[in-house]
Image: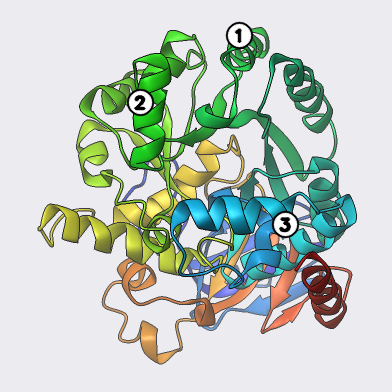
Amino acid sequence: MKIRFFNARIMPLSTNDNSCSIIEGELHTNGSKICYVGENVKDAEGFDREIDCKGNLIMPGFKNAHTHSAMTFLRSYADDLPLQEWLFNRVFPREDKLTPDDVYILTKLAIMEYLTSGITSCFDMYFFRDSIASAAIDTGYRMVLCGAVNGGAENAKTLSDEYQKFNNYNELISYQLGFHAEYTTSLDLMKEIARLSHEFKAPVFTHNSETEKEVAECKERHGKTPTALFEDLGMLEYGGGGFHCVHFNESDMNTFKSKGLWAVTNPGSNTKLASGIAPIWQMQKKGINIAIGTDGSASNNCLDMFREMFLVTGLQKIREKDAAVCDGLDVLTMAVKNGALAMGLVDSDCLAEGKNADLVMIDLNRPNMQPLNNIAKNLVYSGSKSNVKMTMVNGKILYENGEFFIGESPENIYRKCNETADRLR
């Protein structure tokens, strides 16, 4: 299908442009790819659909670089609790009851929410990866699966098998090596993961230094921080990164810089669980790669990139006691281009000919976006999900003007998810 978007403001976020500059013109898609970005074309023909953007903004979709999609069943179920009680008494016991069918429908619900927030792909670490992949394919959504193994060395085979399976599975699905965290994973398994990283020449991702307790207990077990442990095991030679990265010391940050790793910050979740504020500004000054994730809706509770962007910059200004730190343009880049690169989606990072047609139309004709003093900063400081007019993934419009086009009715998905949540309670 060929689609023409005309009379648009376009923010390409091209590879070498961190200024979030905007051009006026049009964008064409042909099947799953972008085939034109430039000035308005006279007498354009041969399109299956032509969309007059009426001056609204076309931009690359946001990338959710860390989430647990199917945790939608725990939304607002276990709030306002201390972290350990929340995790061990409320979350883990109910997750133990999940079935593959549960994860399939709960992931669909998360995908709907991603689409309303202009998120065109996510980096999902959760159980039953086949079910996650099926939900993504059936809705037309782009999903990067993250390995989530833990326990003993025998589980390395699962990671190896999944890496080879899901990276040759479907154009919407890819996979990165990963494990849950140091505190749930044996040293023998971590050694095997390092070996797999070298075998596949592949990056590795994991939860890293989310809480003070996690770091302190790692030091008790191994005499070093999680980052130092992973480096000593040879796990970081081919890149990768950490989710959260809240309690980093200077050495941890230096390792992330020297190895070209990605720090994926999750400010909404870290705020709600009182885990702390990641030193994002300090990382920025060192030139560390930074992306943004929502985490799961058990700890957030919403899957909203607009809220995350505001929290990234706002919390840094409080942490550093300096309103000038963590510029909004940098944060927008983290949420779009950086997220794509962290996830390995090198063809979804910007709007250019030959890139994936993963894009969003932002409604600028809303009170919170006027006047148009600085559209890019408006997105970070005043934008909201209400501004997302349309979300396209892989050349298909999956959400437009409040309607979903994902192969199943919202009402049916809501009903199934509530039945699942009732059973698991």
Is any part of residue 245 visible from this angle?
no
- The chosen color scheme is rainbow
Q: Amino acid at mark 2?
A: Phe
| Circle 1 residue | 198
Q: Residues within 10 Å of mark 3 (few under 14, many from 20)?
A: some
Task: Say whether disc 1 or disc 3 marks the residue closer to the N-terminus.
Answer: 3
Depth check: give the residue in front, 278 or 166.
278
Mark 1 and 2 residues: CB-CB less than 8 Å, in contact? no
Task: Give the secondary structure at mark 3.
Answer: helix
Q: Residues within 10 Å of mark 2 (few under 14, many from 20)?
A: many
Q: Residue at x 56, y 23 (%)?
A: 203
Residue 94 — which label?
A: 3
Q: Position of residue 377 (x, y in %)?
A: 31, 68
| Circle 2 residue | 256
Q: CA distance from mark 1 to mark 3?
A: 36 Å
Q: Residue at x 61, y 47 (%)?
A: 353
Is any part of residue 184 visible from this angle?
yes
Q: Residue at x 53, y 33 (%)?
A: 206
Residue 274 — which label?
A: none
Task: Say whether disc 1 or disc 2 marks the residue closer to the N-terminus.
Answer: 1
Q: Is residue 396 above or below residue 65?
A: below
Mark 1 and 3 residues: CB-CB less than 8 Å, in contact? no
Residue found at the far bottom of this picture: 367
Task: Say whether disc 2 or disc 3 marks the residue closer to the N-terminus.
Answer: 3
Q: Amino acid at mark 1?
A: His
